Amino acid sequence: MLKPPPPPVRARPRALSNWLFAVAALVVLMVVVGGITRLTESGLSMVRWEPISGIVPPLNEAQWQAEFDHYRQSPQYQQVNRGMSLDEFKTIFFWEYVHRVLGRLIGLAFALPLAWFAVKKAIPRGYGWKLVGLLALGGLQGAIGWWMVASGLVDEPAVSHIRLAVHLLTALVILGALVWVALDLRTLARNPGAAPAGISALAVWTLSVLFVQFLFGAYVAGLDAGHAFNSWPLMGDALFPPDTPMLEPWLRNFVDNPIVVQFVHRWLAFAVAGVALALAWRAWRAGFAAEGAAVAGLIVVQILLGIMTLLSGVELWVAVAHQGVAALLLVAIVLAAHRLGAARA
């Protein structure tokens, strides 16, 4: 008796890859908007967390006044913005509102297509758990966002820089994972027998040092440490100010001391540059010239933007560009690492 023919393959790895790249682009936009929200000190303007109804902004003067009245009870208004007008409040409310709505949009842009692909049985074997994991990370990120904001609504009129770092690093982990899985799926679309890409030791080191730098960048933002010294390469008249007040225990300085945090962020950038350029050179030699050039070019741009951010006194759009290019640099490094890993596989 003849065996029945195998069922048709319904997996659509290329469509899944395109979808994940689109979501990754939204995450990059989210990182940029998050930077604007932080730099304009808009993050505490919405003092309530309403995941569903909060998507509708105030629509008339009475609703705006009610929202403003809620804000006037917050520590930020009481201690920093006392006397702020309603029009000024609308400006800071705008950026936090856009940030939250964009977060919801990303959630829907991931969850709804994922459900559709699952119903159509279009997800290749071995990728379902990865996609569900990314969805769970996205939900966790929303909770982390409110956990961060809540830290500035009790006594101190500023969010915890540690919670801010957790929020930013989680966003960047999601971004890197989206791009990596999208690249695996793109490879699978070209070659149905392809295995997921491996990762080299150099790529692991590059991403590890990069994420430590992201951590200190978040600390700089959360502590307003970019304003501590606006000169480069010296901090004032010295490489490291000798009269810097130090905290006890000593390790706390690497988390809570704005001068130490800015110093580490300045010079760790060159360690990142070293390992990233090594990865770029390896990609170039392996035949991935465009990927290597992207990493090298973005490293140079990012360091220059960091210096310009300091020299400009943390000018808003220079600092926002610095954060946005950081996200693009992560994408470029993930792309180069994946190309090398896929070639080895």
Image: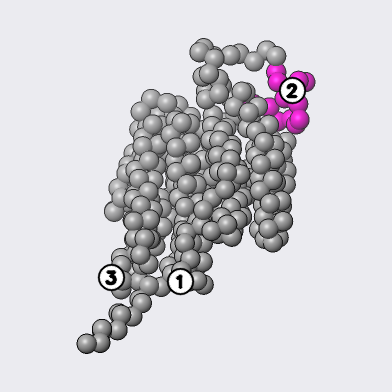
Dominant secondary structure (helix, strand or loop) of the stretch shown in magenta: loop
Rendering coords of residue 26 (x, y %): 48, 58
Q: Earlier in the sequence, mark 3 or mark 1?
A: 3
The quarter of the displayed image where residue 57 is located: bottom left
Residue that badge 3 annotates:
119
Label 2 close to label 3 by CB (< 8 Å): no
Residue, far bottom: 1
Disc 3 to disc 1, how far (Cα)? 21 Å
Q: Dot 2: within a 10 Å radius of its alpha carbon, few (fewer than 14), some, or many (20 or more) residues?
A: few
Residue at image point 74% right, 23% down: 239
Give yes or no for residue 152 being in the magenta stretch. no
Rendering coords of residue 76 (x, y %): 44, 32
What is the secondary structure assignment of the residue under circle 3?
Answer: helix
Residue at image point 68% right, 58% down: 286
Residue 239 numbered mark, or none: 2
* Residue 283 in the figure: left or right of residue 11: right
- The magenta segment is 228-241
Q: Nearer the viewer, mark 3 or mark 1?
A: 1
Can residue 324 be seen here? The reply is no
Q: Dot 1: within a 10 Å radius of its alpha carbon, few (fewer than 14), some, or many (20 or more) residues?
A: few
Q: Nearer the viewer, residue 296 or 25?
A: 296
Rendering coords of residue 89 (x, y %): 46, 43
Name the amino acid type tagged 2.
Leu
Name the amino acid type tagged 3.
Val
Q: Dot 3: within a 10 Å radius of its alpha carbon, few (fewer than 14), some, or many (20 or more) residues?
A: few
Disc 2 to disc 3, how far (Cα)? 59 Å
Q: Earlier in the sequence, mark 2 or mark 1?
A: 1
Q: Earlier in the sequence, mark 2 or mark 3?
A: 3
Name the amino acid type tagged 1.
Pro
* Residue 22 in the figure: left or right of residue 134: right
Residue 192 numbered mark, or none: 1
Residue at image point 76% right, 20% down: 238
